[in-house]
Amino acid sequence: MVAPVAGLATGVLGSVLLAAAWRTCGVGVNGAANGLALIFYGALLSGIAALWWGVLIGYVGRRNLPVALLGGTVGTAVMVRIFVALLQVPHGYRC
């Protein structure tokens, strides 16, 4: 039960942070196009994060739950950071 919830939370967090970065930099054509892209990217991030959490809780969590939770949290933070860093400035311009 932890993996789907944590994956969804990661996708939402990544999408919210990316939307804020895009608004600040004025990226995109319009709100509808940006929203569709954010839904797609957020779903992809949610799936990857849910898989990460599932592996950690399923395998590591049997032996040491605090280590699994810490690894999941750190892995999620790294995923969100990479997600926002890669997609924040499409086409390479800086705001």
Image (cartoon, helix red, strand yellow):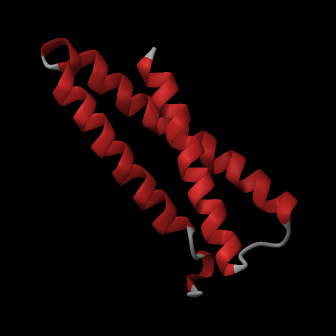
Q: Is residue 13 above or below residue 18?
A: above
Indicate left or right for 36 with 43 as reference: right
Q: Residue at x 61, y 75 (%)?
A: 90
Q: Residue at x 78, y 52 (%)?
A: 36
Which residue lies at the image location 66% right of the left edge and 61% below the top edge?
19
Q: Residue at x 62, y 40 (%)?
A: 43
Is residue 79 depicted above or below 62 in this figure? below
Q: Nearer the viewer, residue 16 or 30?
A: 16
User: Relative to 88, is 33 above or below?
Assistant: above
Q: Viewed as shown, does residue 74 lie left or right of 33?
A: left
- Indicate the position of residue 60 as horizontal and vertical percent values: 19, 22
Q: Quadrant of the C terminus?
A: bottom right
- The image quadrant of residue 65 is top left
Residue 80 appears at what percent x and percent y? Answer: 45, 53
Number of labelled discs?
A: 0
* Image coordinates for residue 75, horizontal then vertical, percent: 31, 44
Q: Residue furthest left?
A: 63
| Residue 57: quarter of image | top left
Instruction: Using residue 59 as the reference point, say whether residue 47 is left or right of it.
Output: right
**Where does the image place residue 63, in percent across and percent down from the top left?**
13, 15
